[in-house]
Image (tube, rainbow, N blue to C red):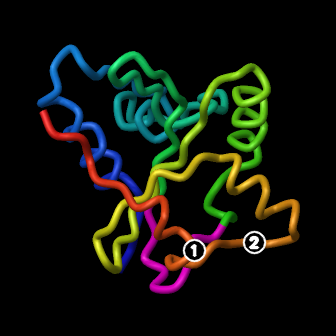
Amino acid sequence: MKNNGKPSEEIFDDAWKPLGKRAYVFKFEDTASLRGRNKKAVFAAAQPSDRLLVHDGQTCFAEIKSTIDPVRFKFTLLRRVQGFAAASAIAAGGSYDVFIHNLSQNQWFRLPYSVIAAAKEEGRGSLTWDELSPYSWSFPLA
């Protein structure tokens, strides 16, 4: 099974639409979306995350990741620029969440980046699905 992440991003975007004005999702442009529009090689500057999410008065950077790994979420799925952006957002009092779609079990997690940062400081390169269970998440209902 090949995973390019786009179906999970579409699921994420579509899930907020029924909330109407209670939710706003801004999609940052990436190289893939620009190439699709122009059909040419393009350059897009690195973005802080996939989306900016505002829901019921709360704003956060939202990075959407999907994986077919049956055991764990590997931090190598995140780019360094996302880590830098997360650290900056958190230092400024904001929030940065990684929305993880476990494709092997069709389960979602909403993980604050601070949890990833703490695990990295311990020298870890991943978190198991069992460790992520407290962050299990389902989309809000309208």
Q: Residues within 10 Å of mark 2 (few under 14, many from 20)?
A: some
Question: From what the image shows, is residue 76 above or below residue 62?
Answer: below
36, 65: nearer the viewer: 65
Residue 126 at x, y = what percent? 68, 72
Q: Which residue is mark 1?
A: 131
Q: Quadrant of residue 47?
A: top right
111, 2: nearer the viewer: 111
Disc 1/disc 2 C-alpha distance (Å) = 13 Å
Left/right placement of residue 126 relative to residue 99 reads: right
Question: From what the image shows, is residue 102 above or below residue 88?
Answer: below
Q: Nearer the viewer, mark 1 or mark 2?
A: 1
The amino acid type, in three-letter code, at marker 1 is Glu
Residue at the image position 54 percent from the left and 31 percent from the top: 61
Q: Residues within 10 Å of mark 1 (few under 14, many from 20)?
A: few
Secondary structure under tag 2 reads loop
Quadrant of the image containing the N terminus: bottom left
What is the magenta range? 66-74
Q: Quadrant of residue 121?
A: bottom right
The amino acid type, in three-letter code, at marker 2 is Gly
Q: Which mark is residue 125?
A: 2
Question: From what the image shows, is residue 72 above or below residue 18?
Answer: below
